[in-house]
Image (cartoon, coloured by chain):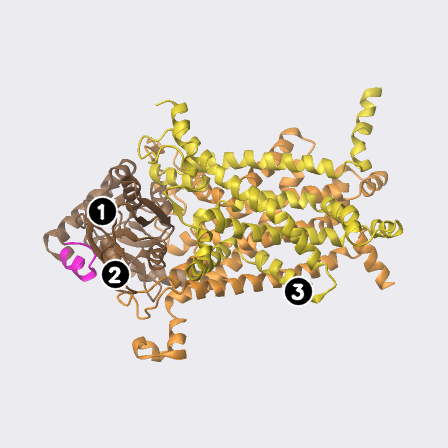
Chain colours: A yellow, B brown, C orange
Amino acid sequence: MSCWDTIADYGLRSIGIGERLLPTENFTLCQQFTLIGSGMLWNIYFGVLALLAGFFFAVALAVGKASQSRLIRKPAEWFIFVFRGSPLFIQFFFAYFLFLSLKQVIPFFSPLTSAWLGALVVLFFNTAAYSAEIFHGALQSIPKGDLEAADAYGMSGWSRFRRITFPTMLRLAWPAYTNEAIFLFHATTLVFFSGFPAWRQKGDALYYANYFADKTFNPFIPYPILAGYFILLTLCIVGLYGLANRHLNRHLPSNARRPIKLRPTLLR
Amino acid sequence: MKKLILTTAALALTAGIASADGHGKTVRMGTEGAYAPWNFVNDAGEIDGFERELGDELCKRAKLTCEWVKNDWDSIIPNLVSGNYDTIIAGMSITPERDEVIDFTQAYTPPDPSAYVAMSADVEVEGGVIAAQATTIQAAFVAEQGWTLVEFATPDETVAAVKNGEADAVLADKSFLDTVAGTDGLVMLERMEQIGGGVGMGVRESDQELKATFDAAIQSMKDDGTLNAMIAKWEVASQW
Amino acid sequence: MFSYCSDPSTLDGLTWLSCYLTTGKHMGLYVSVVTVLVLLAVTAPVALLFGFAGAASARSRIAPLRWFGKAYTAIVRGVPDIAFFLFFVIALDQGFEWIRHKILCSDWDQPIRQGSDFVVCDAAKLPLSSSPQWVHETYGFLLAVLTFAIVFGAFAANVLFGAMRAVPRAQMETAEAYGMSHRQAFWRIMVPQMWVYALPGLSNLWMVLIKATPLLFLLGVEDIVYWARELGGTKNARFTDYPHGDWRMWYFLALLVFYLAFTKVSEIVLDKIMKKLTHGQATAAGEAQRKAAA
C-alpha cells in the first residue's frame, strides 16, 4: 500500500471520513504522519474558533474589568481570576460534569457533552480570560496623551473607543496576545487527553500519537511527529500574528526604521 | 522535602520487609496501582491486591529482594524496556503485539472473558454505544466490531458514562466489573467476549534469566495449589 | 491515625471524616502538595537560569551559540508541554545512562540497543537498581525538575530576550562612552535593569508553570491531581474500610480552591516585587513612584 493510499484512507479519519478501522499492525511512518496530521484538524478547529470567539469576549471582559462601576467590574474580575487561576485539567473536569447534569435536565444541551462543542466552550472561556487580562494590561498603559487628544477632537464614548482606545490597546497587547494564541493551540491537546471522551476513535493529534505510542510501544516516533506538526503550526501562528502586527503598527515611525538602517550599506 | 524522603523511605522499608531474607539481587516490580482487585493502593497508601501478594510470594520463592514501583499505564512498557524497573506485574494480558516488544513469563491466571455492564439486563450490545478505557484490548475489540466506541481515560469514567446514559454498556475485564456490578443499578450482561490471553509478568527480552526464575516460581505456586488459593481469595479470575 | 479509627464502619459524621482524611493514602495526597510546592520552588530558579543562558546565547556574537539559543527557544516553545513530557523524560534518562555507560563500562561488548531494549551495564544504571526507593524517587523528581526547567526555560529565554532589548539603547551607549567593555556593560548596566521589563512576562510564566503541575504524573511524580483522581474514584467496600461513591467532584473542588489560593498569593507577592523593582527605574511607573514620593 503506497503512502498516497494511506493518505486517502486516513487523511480525514479524525472527522470520520475514510477507513473505519485504525491500522492495527505493521505501522508505517506514513500512517503515523497521516493520522497524527489528520488529528491536527481538531487542534486547529478548537484553536481557531476559540480564539476568534474568545477575542470579542476578551475585549468585553477587559473593558468590564477597567470599568468604574463595581457591578460590572467585579464579575469580570472574578471570571478572569477563576479561569486564569485554575489548571485547564480541572476546568475540563467541571465543565464535563456540569454539561452532563445540564443534559439530564434539558435535552437541548446534549451537544455540550461532546468534545466539538463542550471543549470548545471551555477553551473559549479560558482564552477569553487570559486574553482579557492581557488587554486589560494594555488598556491601563494607553498613553494619556492619546486620550487627551481624542477629547480635544471632541470624540467621546463609542467613537473614542473605536478609533483611539481599541486600536492602541490592540497594538500594545499584540506581542503578549501572540503568546496566548500559541498557548491556546497547545492547550487543545488536553481535550481528549483528560477532558472529553473520544467517539469512534475520532480524536486530535495527541490522541492518535498516543494510539501509536501504545501500539508500537515506542514513544520516540509518534510524539516527535506530533511535536513537528506543532512547531509548524506555531510558526504559522507567529507568521500570521506578525503580519497583523505590521498592519496594526503601519502608521508608526518605528516601522520606517528599516529603510534607515539599510541606508548606510547602500551609501557605501 | 524531608517529609517526602521520610515517607518514601518508610514505604521502601515496608516493601523490603516482605523479602528481607532474600539475598539475591534487587528486582524492581512495576505496577499501575489503580486496578482493583489486581493491584491498587490501599488505605495505608501501600500497593495492595492480588498481584502484590503474588509478587511478594514469587520473590520469596525465587530468593529475590523485591521493590514495588508505581507507573502510569500508558508508559509502563517504555519504562520497562528502558530499564527503570525489571518486571511489569499489572494485570497485563499476554497479547502477540506486546510479546513482540517484551517477553512474558508463563501466565499466572487463565484467559478470562471480558464482560459487559449496563443499566438493564436486556441492553442490545450489537450496534450500541460501548464505553471502554482508551488503548485497552477491549477498546480495540469494540472498534473492530464496528460498534460505536466511546473511550475514556480511566476505568472509573467508563462506568460513570454508563450510569449517566452516555454509553449503553461498558466492556472491561470481568474481575473489574464484578466490583461495580450490583451497585447503583448496574447489572452484568450474559454476553461475554473471549479476548486477550492469560495474564503474565512482563520482562525485558534481554532478561531471559529473570524470566526463567519467575517462570519456575510461578510453576511451583501452580503445583502446590497456592496460586489457586490466591486467585480464589482475590476473585481475580477462574482457577487453573 | 487516631486511636478510635480502628473500626471505621462503626463511625459516622465528623469522626468518620477525621479518620478518612488521615489514612495513609491521604497522607500521600498531602505529601504530594509539598512535593508540588518544592518542585515549583526548585524549578523556578533553574528555569530562570536556563532562560538567562538561552537569552544570552541568542544575543551572542558567536554565530553557532546564537543559532543554538534561537533554535532552543523556537523549538521548545513550539511544542505543547504535554507532548514534550510524554517522551522527553525517558530520552533524558537514557541519555544519562548512555553517557555513564560509555565512561564506566568501556569493556562492555554487547550492544546497548537490543531490539527494543535499552541495556546498559549495572554500574551505569541511574540510580543503581540496588539503591533504596527514595533514591529512585529523588532521581525521578530531579528529572522532572530538569524537564520542566528546559521547557519553561525556553519561554523564560523569550521573555528575557525581549527584556534585554527593552533596556534603553542610550543606557548602553552611555556605558560605552564611560569606557566599559561589552561584557562590563552587559553585566553592570543591562542585567540590573532588564528585570523590570521582564517581570510581567515572567510572572505570567510563573502562573503557567503553576498550572502545568497536573502534568507531573506524566513525568513519574505523583502530583495532587493524580491523588485527587485516585482518592475520589468510587471505592468498593471490598478493598477499603472507607467505601464511598464517586467523590472526584469534592476532591477537584478542593484542588480548585488550592490553585486559586496559590494564584492569589502569587499575584500579591509578584505585585510587591514589581513595586520594588520599579523603584528608581527609567519607566513611566518608576517616574510615577518618584513623583509620589517627592
Residue B53 is at least partly visible in this image: no
Between residue B166 and residue B51, name the one nearer to us: B166
Left-right relation of C180 to C200:
right
Task: State the residue position of label 2.
Answer: B181
Residues at badges 1 and 3 in contact (C-beta under 8 Å)?
no
The part of the chain drawn in magenta is B228-238
SS class of the residue under badge 2? Answer: loop
User: Within the magenta stretch, is there residue B231?
Assistant: yes
Indicate which label's residue lies in the foreground, 1 or 3: 3
Task: State the residue position of label 1.
Answer: B200
* Residue shown at 34% from the left, 47% from the top: B85
Task: State the residue position of label 3.
Answer: A74
Between residue B17 and residue C266, name the one nearer to us: C266
Between residue C186 and residue B157, name the one nearer to us: B157
Q: Residues within 10 Å of mark 2 (few under 14, many from 20)?
A: some
Magenta portion: prevailing SS class? helix
Q: Position of residue B141 (x, y in %)?
A: 27, 42
* Residue shown at 41% from the left, 75% from the top: C18
Label 1 – label 3 distance at C-alpha: 59 Å
SS class of the residue under badge 1? Answer: loop
Q: Is residue B185 above or below residue B212?
A: below
Amino acid, disc 1: Gly
